[in-house]
Amino acid sequence: MSHTVMQILLAAIVVLPLLGAVAALLPAPPGLKGKSPDQAVLRHGVTVTGAVLALSVALAAGFDHDDPARMQATTDISWIPALGIRIHLGVDGVSLPLLVLTALLTFLSALYSYVKMPDGPSPKAFVALILVLESGTLASFAVLDLMLFFLAFEMVLIPMYFLIARWGGDGRERAAWRFILYTLLGSVVMLLGLLLIGIKGGTFDMVALATDNGSGLSHTTQLVAVLAIGIGLAVKAPMWPLHSWLPDAHTAAPTVGSVLLAGVLLKMGTYGFVRILLPITPDGVHTFAPYLAAFAVVGIIYGSLVCLALARSGAGGDLKRLIAYSSVGHMGFVLLGIATLTPTGVNGALFANIAHGLITGLLFFLVGAVKDRYGTSDLDRLSGASGAALYGKAPRLGGLLAFGAVASLGLPGLAGFWGEMLAMFGSFEPAEGLSRPAYLTFMAIAGFGTLLTAAYMLIVVRRVCMGGDGESGGHTGGHGGGSAPAPTSLPDVQTYEFAAWTPLVVLTVLAGLWPAALLGLTDPAVQQLLGGGN
């Protein structure tokens, strides 16, 4: 495919959702109203996100897979000459999978919302916010200018805030405020670091800075920049102990909000580590890497222990909150892989990013479906004597939940396995100059974390899918949150749910059985980023 066509494709992928968001707010043309204006605008959301997905698949098809380390589909035009800020777009093997994942999850969310619109204000605003969110996320993965990256990084905050605050569940106002305050404070610190690099390095161009490999930045400058930018990215990632906004945001968000938050937004933080910090400030990253790895493994254990506590019978744990805390653990593996500073570890981190997006996106869809049917996501009520017992009442839904759980715990042959294994392999042989005994300790702790993950996921499957928890669950189910009797049967998976979930199931299996498809894309690009553009 010619360079010009690829250029146009990438620019269209970033701009089309924005144009679609503006169009969503306009009155529907008379011939396209369908049954109601609400239905017309929801259909508009499906159409625009579908078009963006088609364009991203076309971009992936036209991508030169023989040279994934080279920036392709590049556009580079001056925007603010006085500050040296350029509109610089491009994709390589690191960003292409994330672009396609973002386009896919947003399309599936729009498709799901077409039938199952969350309770709240007008669908017009809902569709417009989803599209602005998509545009900002896609731009984050496509831009190659530090200031543009910051603008795209910030662009997603407002739509996600409103999605939680207006269409969320209990506690949505508080959750939305915590989300925006944490991420904005992190972003302010990050901006200072990005400005420091741009001023000291003489350019905001990420490709030029990566090629210099930190040669134009003193060691002190690199340390300050890594600390400042790292804090902003770690909040979004989310790294322990900067993660505390996440469980509330996930628990309160509508189903598609949780899917996009876990599947796409968290990836912007870890992508920033790989795209900006590793190649541009290598000395600073080398100094901080052991601390990043330590925080990462604490996050793995902490997330797993909280999940185990929530999964306990009688603990009053919320299934949505449990999946949110599991994200803290899974993203810990991604950060550990990055902290090894080795191609093996960083490839594992990028693979785990994609796997987490697919699997956790699926899990949030499934938990949303259980909550819609049962009226609660309280684990004690779902697993009581009169609880969900999905295997008996909705076997397909139960089967899919069990599949999502075993994929999440890293069963070999499914996508969750490879990223975590490669992150630990990277820890076994960290980059030169890093303490091997320390990293072997981190590897052992992370390995223990995988056992804890298996424990809490299997407890969840046993309780929700099989039911009959004994006295505590049955008792809580009898009076918790209302006197309505539990349904004896639940509607099983509907057609629109099959349509929204099947691609995630298929890709989870494919990525698990054929990891080379993804690693073949990322590895040359990672080697080049770690080698300073060489």
Image (tube, grey):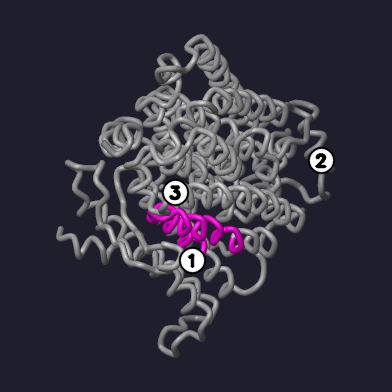
Tell me if 418 is positioned left or right of 362 in this view: left
Residue located at (33% from left, 65% from top): 11
Near-viewer residue (363 or 194) = 194
Frontmost of labels 3 and 2 is 3
Q: Which mark identifies residue 478?
A: 2
Helix, strand, or loop for circle 1?
helix
Residue located at (44% from left, 48% from top): 501
Q: Which mark identifies residue 381?
A: none
Q: Position of residue 423 (x, y in %)?
A: 44, 24
Q: Residues within 10 Å of mark 3 (few under 14, many from 20)?
A: many
Relative to 90, say whether 354 is above or below: above
Near-viewer residue (164 or 278) = 278
Q: CA distance from mark 1 to mark 3?
A: 20 Å
Q: Are marks 2 and 1 in contact (CB under 8 Å)?
A: no
Q: What secondary structure do most residues of the magenta stretch adopt?
A: helix
Helix, strand, or loop for circle 2?
helix
Range covered by the magenta-colored residues: 132-159
Q: Residues within 10 Å of mark 2 (few under 14, many from 20)?
A: some
Q: Amino acid at mark 1?
A: Leu
Q: Amino acid at mark 3?
A: Trp
Q: CA distance from mark 3 to mark 2?
A: 32 Å
Which residue has dot 3 on it? 501
Q: Earlier in the sequence, mark 2 or mark 1?
A: 1
Query: Residue 155 lies in magenta, yes or no?
Result: yes
